[in-house]
Amino acid sequence: MNSEADKTQATNATLAMSNAEKHPAVESTSSLPTSPPATATAATESCAPAAISPPAPAQATTQTSVPTPAPEALANGNSNSNIQEVVATTSSGSAAATTAEGGATVNGAGGVVTSAAAATPPPSAKTVNVRDTTTSAGVSSSSASKSSGLLTVNSNHHHHHHHQQSSSSSTSSQQQATPSTVVMQSSSQHQRSNKNEDAPNILVYKKMETIIEKMQAESTGVAVRTVKAFMSKVPSVFTGADLVAWILKNFDVEDVTEALHFAHLLSSHGYIFPIDDHALTVRNDGTFYRFQTPYFWPSNCWEPENTDYALQKMFSRKWEFIFMQAESQSKVAKKRDKLERKVLDSQERAFWDVHRPMPGCVNTTEIDIKKAYRRGGSSHGTGSSGASVAKNPIEQLSRIIALRKQKLERRTIKVSKAAEALVAYYDQYNEFDYFITSPELPNPWQTDSTEMWDTEKNSKEVPVRRVKRWAFSLRELLNDAIGRDQFTKFLEKEYSGENLKFWESVQEMKALPQSEIKEAIHKIWQEFLAPDAPCPVNVDSKSVELAREAVNSPNGPNRWCFDVAASHVYHLMKSDSYSRYLRSDMYKDYLNCSRKKIKSIPNLFGVKR
Amino acid sequence: MPKIDPETQALYDEINGMIEKFKEDQKAKADCTLADKCGDMSDVTKIRFSSKKILKGHINKVNSVHFAGDSRHCVTGSLDGKLIIWDTWTANKVQIIPLRSAWVMTVAFSPSGNFVACGGMDNACTVYDVNNRDASGVAKMVRELVGYEGFLSSCRFLDDSHLITGSGDMKICHWDLEKGVKTMDFNGHAGDIAGLSLSPDMQTYITGSVDKTAKLWDVREQGHKQMFFGHDMDVSSVCYHPNGYGFASCSEDQTARLYDLRSDQQIGLYAPPQKNTGFTSCALSTSGRYLMCGGIEGMVHSWDTMKQKHTGTLSGHENRITCISLCPNGMCLASTSWDQQVRLWL
C-alpha cells in the first residue's frame, strides 16, 4: 500500500480539480461553476476560450491574484474547502514552478496549474499535513488567502485528511491514490458515515464481506496471480473457474449452478468484478476477475451523486490528457507502478458499474426512491417527517379514544362467519375467475381473437356464465348493460319501470357537472316525486319529505338530495322486482337460450371444484 | 420525551386498556381460522400464468401500472418522464404522454378509459384527457392538482370527475375534477400513505400506510371507519376483496395479509417460502382465491388465500417489481419493474 501514497502526487491534478468541482455539489450551497477548477481545466486544455468563466483572468495571473477567487468561494458560507483548493492549485503552482519544472508546464496559466497540482508536496509534506490537522479550519482558510505556497498546500491536504479520519488508514491511502471520484466520495462518505447503520442491505453486506475476506486469505483463499499476456501483464486476477471451485470447496453448496449463482450475487454487489466487462456477473471459465478494494464496498454506504458520474463523463475527453500530464509528472517525481494503477482504474470502474450499471444489469445498491425521500435524503420536501404530529396531545388522545370507543361498540361477526362468506363468494365466482376456470370465450391475448371484447358489444350472444351472474345480485345485473336492458323490459311488463328509471336518473344526475345539477334535480323531482308527478315512484312519505327538504333547502339542492329515496327504491327493486325477475320465464328463457347457443368448451385445466 | 402530565397519562392508560379489550374481543370472535374452515376445500393448482408479452418502450424504471375498465388498455408511468398507454392485446403504444416532471410514482386510469392521472415527487397530481389532443398532438392536460406537501403515492378515479389521492404528507384528498377543486383534505395516517384501493361498489376505500396500518374510509366522510393492524413494517399496497367485505395487504415485512371488515380483524397471513423479498404491490383474483404480490427480488408470488398455501412464483423481471395490476376481467396481470420492463402475464 505504501506505493500508493506516491500516486497521490501523480494524480493530484485530477484530485484537486475534481475535489473543488465537487464541493458545490456536495454542499449544495453553491452550484455555479464559480469554482476556479473549471477554469483550471480550461486552462489545462489551453484551447478552450469558451470555458473561461469570470475567475479566469484571475487565474491567468496566478501568483498575485490568489485572493481574487477566494471571496467568491467565501460567499458560500462555510465552504472554506473551496478556498483551500483554489489556493492550493494556484499557489502551489508557484511552488511547482520553482521545484518541478518537468513535463508539460509551458502553456501559461494552464501549465502552471497542472504542474502545481501534480507536483504537490512530497511525502514529507504530507506528514506535516497530518500534524496540521489540529489547527482549526478557520485559521488555515484565512491564512490561505494570503500565505505562501506551502502552507496553503497543507491546508488543502488538511482538508482531505479531515475526511479520512473517519475511515481506516489503509483505505485512506487508497482514497488518495485513485483518481477522479475518490475525493468526492471521501467527502460524501464523511457526510453519510453516520447513516451507515440503517443502510438497507447492511446485514447482507457484512455477511458478504466476511466471505470476501475469507476468499482473500493468503493461503486458503482464492489464488490471485498476475497473468503474463503477450505484451503486457494482467495484475492481481483470478479466473471465474477458480472462484467457483473455491466456493464449491469451502461452502456447503450443492452444485456448480448454485456456486455460480452465489458468485454472481457477490459480483452484482460489487465485491468482485470482471476485469474487462461492465456486466457484473461471473462465468465459470477463464475470464479474469479481481477483488474490489474495501474502500469501494457498498457497505461504505455511498450514494454517489449524478454529478460525480457526470463529472467523470464531462472530463472523459480531457481525461487522457490530464492523465498524460499527471503521469509524465509522476515519472519525473517518482517511478510509478503501472500495474497498480491498472488495478486501481479497474476498481474504480467497477465501482461505477455497481452504482450506475449499464442497461439491463442488476442494480443492487439502489434503494426505493420513496424511502430515500422519507429518510430525509432529499433536501426539498419533507415526506412524513414534516407534517405536524402533536398539536395538543390531550386533544389528540381524546380523539383516538373516541375512535377506539367507536371500534369497541361496533358489532363484529365471528371469523367463522367471515370465512364462510369468503367460501361462499368463491363458490359463486370461481367459474368467473380466470385463474381457476378457463373462460368461455377464448382469451384474446392468447388466441389473437378479440371476440371477447367484440361480443360485449352485441347482445345476440351472451355467454351463459354472464347471464348466470345476473342472478348473484342486483348490482351484478345492473352492472351489465344487457342485464340492465333485460331488467328494464321486465319492469316495463310489470308496470314498475319508473323505479329503475328513477334510480338511474339519480345516478346520472350525481355524475353531472355542478352547473347542470340544479336543473336535473328539479326534473327528477317533477317527474318522480312531486305530488302530481307523471310517473310517481313508490317511496315512503318520510323519504319523500327528506327529499323535499333537501331540494328546497336554502343553500340550494345538492347532488345527494335523493340518496335516501334512491336507496329506498333500490332496496325495493332488490327485494321485490329483482327476485321476481329471477323467477320469471323471461330470465329463464334467456338463460336457456344462451345456454343452447354456447358450445361447451372443454375445461382445459380441470381445476373446477 | 417531555414529561407526561397525569391527564395525558390517564388517557394513555385508557387507550392501552382499550387496546387490550380489542385483543380480547378479536380473540373471542376468532372462533376458528380461515385455514380450518377451508380445510375441506379442494386445492387449487399452481398459478398458471406465464410471461406472454413484454411491453417495451420505457427507458427508465417503471413505477406504476393501472388497467382501464375495458381490460384491454393500461397506462404505465416511468422515471423516464413518460406515461405510456398500451393496447395490451397488440402490445402497441396507443399514446405517449410526456410529463412535466419525470418523478412519477403512481398512475391511474379512469374506469371509463377517458382520463389518466399521475403524480409523484412533483407533489402534484396531473390529469390528462386521453381523447383530446393539444396543439402538439399529445393528450391534453386537463387538471393540475397542487397543494401537496409530500409526494403523491397513490391515486384512483371514482368516476370521470372524481379522484381520490393519498400522498407522502399523510393526507387523503378528494378532488372534483369538473371544477378542479379539492372537496376534502384530511390527515389519513400517521405516516406516508402508500396504497389505496376502491371497493367494488365505489362507496368505500382502503388505504395502506407507512405507519403499518390500513384504514377503511367512506368516500363521503372524513373520519376513518375502521383501522387494521398486524404488519410489522410499512404497508406498501392494499387491494379490496371483490366481495367488498375484506381486503388484502402486503408489506415490506415480507408478508401479505387478508383482513375481514365485518369481523374487524386479520384472517389470513401469507409468507413467501424464502425470506428474501419484501412486497411492493398486491392483487386478488376475481373470486378472491388467488393473491398475488410483487416482490423486491423481482418475482410475483401467489397464494391460495383460503388454504393459505404458496401457489408459485412468476419469474421474469430482473429487478424490483414496483407495481402489479390485474385487469378488471381478471385475465391478465401487468407488472412493472425497475428493469424498465412492463410484463403481461396470462
Image: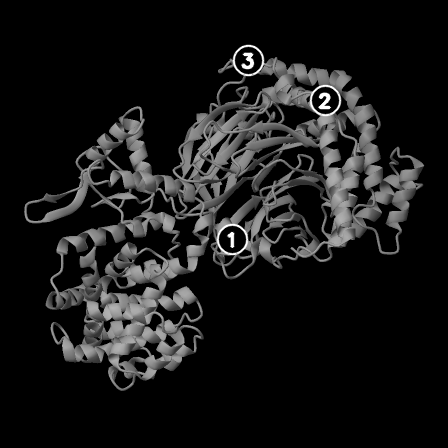
Q: Is A71 left or right of A498, judged from the image as shown? A: left
Residue furthest bottom in the image: A64
Check disc 3 and give the amino acid type: Ser
> Where, quadrant-wise, is the C terminus of chain A in this rendering?
top right
Q: Is A44 left or right of B15, judged from the image as shown? A: left
Residue B76, position as x, y percentages in the image: 49, 44
**Mark 2 / mark 3, whichever is N-terminal:** 2
Above or below, comparing residue A476 to residue A605 in the picture: below
Check disc 2 and give the amino acid type: Lys
Task: Specify the subunit that label 1 lies on.
Answer: A
Viewer can see residue A278? yes
Q: Nearer the viewer, mark 2 or mark 3?
A: 2
Asked if badges 1 and 3 are on one and the same chain, I answer yes
Q: Quadrant of residue B214?
A: top right
Between A340 and A40, the one nearer to me in the picture? A340
Which residue bears the numbered disc 2? A417
Question: Of the numbered discs in the image, which one, if any, rests on residue A413?
Answer: none
Between A508 and B122, the one nearer to me in the picture? B122
Q: CA distance from mark 1 to mark 3?
A: 58 Å
Which residue bears the numbered disc 1? A375
Residue A526, position as x, y percentages in the image: 87, 44
> Where, quadrant-wise, is the N terminus of chain A in this rendering?
bottom left
Which residue bears the numbered disc 3? A600
Asked if badges 2 and 3 are on one and the same chain, I answer yes
| Mark 2 surroundings within 10 Å by alpha-carbon count, few (fewer than 14), some (14 through 19), many (20 or more) | some
CB under 8 Å between discs 2 and 3: no
Check disc 1 and give the amino acid type: Arg
**Mark 2 / mark 1, whichever is N-terminal:** 1
Q: Quadrant of residue B269?
A: top right
Q: Secondary structure at mark 1?
A: loop
| Mark 3 surroundings within 10 Å by alpha-carbon count, few (fewer than 14), some (14 through 19), many (20 or more) | few
Task: Specify the subunit that label 3 lies on.
Answer: A
